[in-house]
Image (cartoon, rainbow, N blue to C red):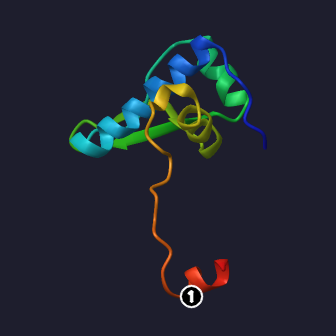
Amino acid sequence: MCLRIMDKRSLDLLEKAFAAEINGALEGGLGLLQTRSKLADKLVESGHLVKATVRLGGRFPVTIEGYRLTILGNATYCFSDRCGDEEVTPNVELTGAAHHERE
């Protein structure tokens, strides 16, 4: 797997999918990107998104379809310039065995 440089429209869609997942986690939503964009289907073919279905039970069950980021889609978005200037991984001081192996 290789991260490729994506065009603006593709990154916009990955950003919306990322925001939907974060919003779902923080606010208890479904975490799905719902769109009719043909670009979403192209990103499914390239492995950046995956189609997902959520079934809500109850008296009148509802099926909701949308898209979620794959690991490749998440990495592509997070390693782009869209994630800001923050570091992807925190600086961690090595201690104990990890510190000795490094020396």
State left or right for residue 90 relative to residue 26.
right
Q: Residue at x 44, y 30 (%)?
A: 84
Q: Nearer the viewer, residue 96 or 19?
A: 96
Quadrant hosting residue 58: top left
Q: Residue at x 38, y 31 (%)?
A: 20
Quadrant hosting residue 25: top left
Residue 39 image offset from top left, x and y in percent: 62, 15
State left or right for residue 55 relative to residue 78.
left
Q: Residue at x 69, y 20 (%)?
A: 42
Q: Residue at x 58, y 29 (%)?
A: 80
State left or right for residue 51 relative to residue 84.
right
What amino acid is labelled 1 in the image?
Answer: Ala
Q: Residues within 10 Å of mark 1 (few under 14, many from 20)?
A: few
Residue 12 image offset from top left, x and y in percent: 51, 17
- The image quadrant where one finds the C terminus is bottom right
Q: Nearer the viewer, residue 42 or 93?
A: 93
Q: Nearer the viewer, residue 90 or 35?
A: 90
